[in-house]
Image: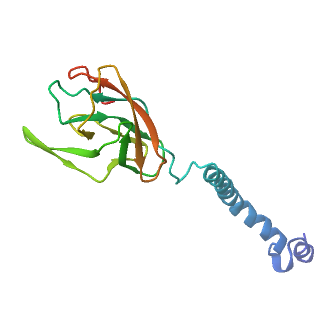
C-alpha cells in the first residue's frame, strides 16, 4: 500500500488512532478493573448482611453447676462453653443467676503442682473461638449458694462487652459427674 493510504488507515504518521489506543488500553486494564469491581460488590454485600468486621452475638449451650458438698459449702462454681462465631473478639464481663447473690468471674493460675485463683473483670471469648470454662481454667464462682439438688436446672444470665445478654441454664451435678467443660 502506498504511504498515503496507510497513513489514512492508521492515522497520521503510521500511528494508531486515539480510538485504537483506547481499545488497546481497555484490553489491558479492563479485566483487572472488572475483577476489582466484582470484588467490591461482593465485599459490600458481605458487609451489608453483617458478615464482615462486625460483632456477631455469642452463643452458649447448657452448662453445669457443681453441687456444693454436704455440710454447707460457702461457695460453688458454674461452667459454660461460650462460642463466638464473629470476627471481633468479645469478653464475658459478668453474670447473674435466678437466686441473686454474688457471682465472680474467676481465672485459675497454675504454678507447677500448686495453683491459686483470682477474680477477673472479664474472660476473653476470641473471634471465631470459644471460652471453655472448666475447674482447671475459669468459672463463675457463686458465694453462699442456696440448697441445690443434683439434676436441678438453674438459669443464668451472662453479660458481654459486645454481645447482648445471654440467658442459659446449667444442670446441678455432683462432684465426679461433671461434663467436659459445659
Compared to residue 56, the image places residue 152 above or below, namely: above
Q: Can you tell which quarter of the image residue 139 is in? A: top left
Q: Position of residue 23 (x, y in %)?
A: 79, 65
Q: Can you tell which quarter of the image residue 172 is in? A: top left
Q: Position of residue 149 (x, y in %)?
A: 29, 21
Q: Nearer the viewer, residue 70 or 182?
A: 70
Residue most extreme to the left: 113
Compared to residue 107, the image places residue 2 above or below, namely: below
Q: Nearer the viewer, residue 27 or 176?
A: 176
Q: Residue at x 82, y 80 (%)?
A: 13
Q: Nearer the viewer, residue 22 or 9?
A: 22
* Residue 59 visible from this viewpoint: no
Q: Position of residue 74 (x, y in %)?
A: 18, 36
Q: How many marks?
A: 0
* Residue 80 visible from this viewpoint: yes
Q: Residue at x 46, y 41 (%)?
A: 166
Q: Quadrant of the C terminus?
A: top left
- Which color scheme is applied? rainbow
Residue 76 located left or right of residue 156: left
Q: Residue at x 50, y 45 (%)?
A: 57
Q: Position of residue 137 (x, y in %)?
A: 23, 39
Amino acid at each position: 500500500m502506498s504511504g498515503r493510504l496507510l497513513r489514512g488507515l492508521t492515522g497520521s504518521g503510521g500511528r494508531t488512532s486515539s480510538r485504537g489506543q483506547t481499545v488497546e488500553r481497555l484490553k489491558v486494564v479492563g479485566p483487572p478493573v472488572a475483577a476489582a469491581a466484582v470484588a467490591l460488590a461482593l465485599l459490600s454485600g458481605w458487609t451489608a448482611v453483617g458478615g464482615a468486621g462486625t460483632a456477631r452475638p455469642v452463643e452458649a449451650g447448657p452448662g453445669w453447676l457443681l453441687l456444693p458438698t454436704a455440710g454447707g459449702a460457702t461457695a460453688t462454681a458454674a461452667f459454660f462453653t461460650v462460642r463466638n462465631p464473629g470476627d471481633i473478639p468479645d469478653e464475658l464481663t459478668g453474670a447473674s443467676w435466678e437466686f441473686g447473690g454474688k457471682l465472680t468471674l474467676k481465672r485459675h493460675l497454675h504454678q507447677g503442682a500448686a495453683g491459686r485463683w483470682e477474680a477477673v473483670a472479664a474472660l476473653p471469648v476470641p473471634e471465631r473461638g470459644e471460652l471453655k470454662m472448666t475447674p482447671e481454667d475459669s468459672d463463675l464462682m457463686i458465694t453462699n449458694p442456696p440448697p441445690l439438688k443434683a439434676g436441678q436446672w438453674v438459669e443464668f444470665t451472662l453479660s458481654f462487652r459486645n454481645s447482648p445478654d445471654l440467658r442459659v441454664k446449667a444442670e446441678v451435678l455432683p462432684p465426679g459427674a461433671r461434663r467436659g467443660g459445659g
